[in-house]
């Protein structure tokens, strides 16, 4: 049998054909496999291909053969990811605001290579999420990677930070001056990625939207603020920061209608103590960073929630209501 021009790629092509064209519901016979190899200008006899199929196990590709009539049908079994797992990853990628549309498509194409061509078509799905706008900052992948590298090497980072102006243009904050921050963690909150770090000049913990960071660089200076982050629970920090806006941290007492118990638990977790007041209400004490976003969240819940303490937060709520009244008079 004359050899094809690509014989040295035979084992690779056998693996490619099996991975692309077979799964638990789709099989290939030996004659079909030999024909598929000829598409790549590779000739082979049955005996050598049987040996190749066994060798694939050394690469973590397990192939099973099942007798059907007078032929064996071969297919790949036990892939690293099950199809439902990949569907879940695709849904997460498509619905994530901080991943651009172009990067989303590129990631999904890579995930499709983990399954057969038949299952790959099932991953070409569209997830519609109300109000979900994709970020326009293509560099976010590399920004996240740079932050992780700085954390692992215990170094500060410097970067520029921007906001959008009314002309829909990027506008650098602080007149383009670089921020110098000690990175300590990343938080995914309300569909956005945030860097949580220590600002040595301000002597406080701050957070920044990763998709609004530009020209990030790792510095030679060692990180500072370790003592502050020893006391910080990142999950609690995100939970207390409404919309990741800062403010004064304090314990706020709320009077809540029983029908909104689920809203409170969803926001603050099952560990909060709901203290019954009467048959229709309970009180709850929660630690939050009191900001305009927190006050707005309370207002959005209508008559079902009332701030009852401490007095300074009650006064802040009254002032916010007066401000809104003035705005709409």
Image (cartoon, rainbow, N blue to C red):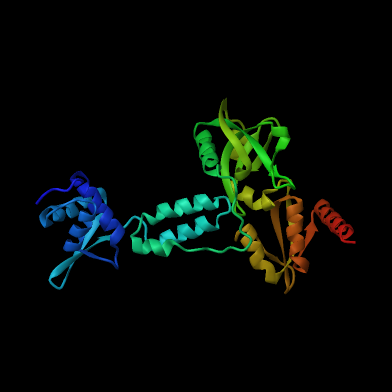
Q: Position of residue 267 (x, y in %)?
A: 64, 59
Which residue is nearer to you in this view: 186 or 314? 186
Left of 148 or right of it: where is 228? right
In what quadrant of the picture does the C terminus appear?
bottom right
Number of marks in picture? 0
**Residue at the image point whose x is 10% and y is 55% from the top:** 47
Along the line of sight, the residue nearer the viewer: 94 or 232: 94
Residue 120 placed where, x, y %? 38, 61
**In the rendered image of this protein, does residue 35 appear above or below residue 59?**
below
* Residue 24 visible to the viewer: yes
The location of residue 19, given as percent across then percent down, is 29, 56
Residue shown at 50% from the left, 55% from the top:
93
Query: Which residue shows up at 64% across the image and 52% down it?
Result: 239
Residue at image location 67% in from the left, 64% down from the top: 274
Q: Where residue 303 sits in the image (x, y, percent)?
A: 78, 68
State whether residue 78 appears in this view: no
The image quarter containing residue 260 is bottom right
**In the picture provided, is 3 more to the left or to the right than 280?**
left
User: Where on the picture, by quarter, is residue 75?
Assistant: bottom left
Q: Residue furthest left?
A: 1
Front-most of residues 278 and 214: 214
Is residue 163 shown left or right of residue 5?
right
Residue 116, above or below 42: below
């Amino acid at each position: 049998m004359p050899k094809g021009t690509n014989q040295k790629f035979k084992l690779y092509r056998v693996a490619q054909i099996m991975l692309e064209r077979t799964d638990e519901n789709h099989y290939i016979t030996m004659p079909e496999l030999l024909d598929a190899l000829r598409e790549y200008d590779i000739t082979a006899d049955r005996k050598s291909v049987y040996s190749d199929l066994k060798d694939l196990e050394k690469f973590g590709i397990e192939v099973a053969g099942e007798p059907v009539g007078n032929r064996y049908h071969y297919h790949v079994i036990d892939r690293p990811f099950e199809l439902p797992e990949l569907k879940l990853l695709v849904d997460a990628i498509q619905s994530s605001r901080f991943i651009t549309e172009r990067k989303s498509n590129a990631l999904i194409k890579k995930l499709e290579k983990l399954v057969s061509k038949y299952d790959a078509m099932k991953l070409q799905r569209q997830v519609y999420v109300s109000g979900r706008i994709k970020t326009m900052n293509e560099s976010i992948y590399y920004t996240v990677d740079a932050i992780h590298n700085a954390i692992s090497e215990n170094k500060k980072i410097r970067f520029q930070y921007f906001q959008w102006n009314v002309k829909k243009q990027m506008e650098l904050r602080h007149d383009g001056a670089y921020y110098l921050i000690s990175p300590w963690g990343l938080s995914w909150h309300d569909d956005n990625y945030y860097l949580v770090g220590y600002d040595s000049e301000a002597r406080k913990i701050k957070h920044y939207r990763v998709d609004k960071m530009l020209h990030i660089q790792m510095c030679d200076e060692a990180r500072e603020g370790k003592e502050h982050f020893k006391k910080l629970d990142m999950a609690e920090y995100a939970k207390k920061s409404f919309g990741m806006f800062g403010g004064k941290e304090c314990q706020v007492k709320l009077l809540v209608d029983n029908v909104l118990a689920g809203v409170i638990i969803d926001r603050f977790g099952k560990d909060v103590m709901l203290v019954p007041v009467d048959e229709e209400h309970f009180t709850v004490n929660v630690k939050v960073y009191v900001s305009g976003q927190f006050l707005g969240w309370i207002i959005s819940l209508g008559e079902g929630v009332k701030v009852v303490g401490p007095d300074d937060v009650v006064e802040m709520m009254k002032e916010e209501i007066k401000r809104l009244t003035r705005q709409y008079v």
